[in-house]
Image (cartoon, helix red, strand yellow):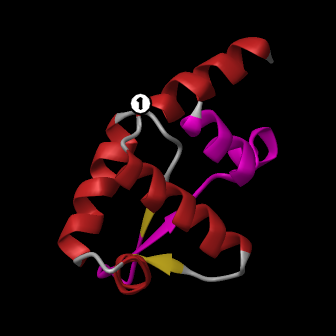
Amino acid sequence: LDSLKKEIRFKVKRLTNQEMLVFSSIYQFENQGHIVDYSLLSTNLGLSESSIRDYIQRIIKKGMPLIKEKVNNKRVILKIPEDFKKLASLNTLIELHDL
């Protein structure tokens, strides 16, 4: 469990502030029951969908758990795995990032 916590801490610390904003927004919107896609994030964060796509790619490259699910071969739904949510709450992730 300690090694998992260290790994999470390391990955969260590697995120830029913008990447952390996008990741935490996905987490928060999911917790509120929203289906998260590029459009929702773009509208709420004031960023272009293209920028959101770039941030998502970088977040995934840095090893953060994020699922991209294509619906009807068109719309991409973004999800954070439930297992990960059980390990780290949104507040915990934000605190780790701000250390």
Residue 54 is situated, as x and y percent measured from the top left of the image, at 22, 57
Q: Quadrant of residue 41?
A: bottom left
Residue 30 is situated, as x and y percent measured from the top left of the image, at 65, 72
Residue at 27% x, 75% y: name it.
Answer: 47
**Which residue is most to the front?**
99
Residue to which mark 1 is pinned:
14
33 left or right, relative to 60: right
Question: Which region shows up in magenta?
Answer: 70-98
47 is within the stretch colored magenta: no
Q: Is residue 43 above or below residue 51?
A: below
Residue 94 is situated, as x and y percent measured from the top left of the image, at 62, 46
Q: Is residue 67 visible?
A: no
Residue at 71% x, 81% y: name it.
Answer: 33
Q: Is residue 2 above or below residue 46?
A: above
Q: Is residue 52 above or below residue 9?
A: below
Q: Is residue 94 visible?
A: yes
74 is within the stretch colored magenta: yes
The N terminus appears in which quarter of the rendering? top right
88 left or right, relative to 14: right
Around disc 1, counting alpha carbons within 10 Å, would you say few (fewer than 14), some (14 to 19), or many (20 or more)?
Answer: some
Residue at 73% x, 42% y: name it.
Answer: 92
Residue at 50% x, 51% y: name it.
Answer: 66
Kind of residue at disc 1: Arg
SS type, badge 1: helix
Instruction: Count numbered badges in the picture.
Output: 1
Residue 13 is situated, as x and y percent measured from the top left of the image, at 49, 30
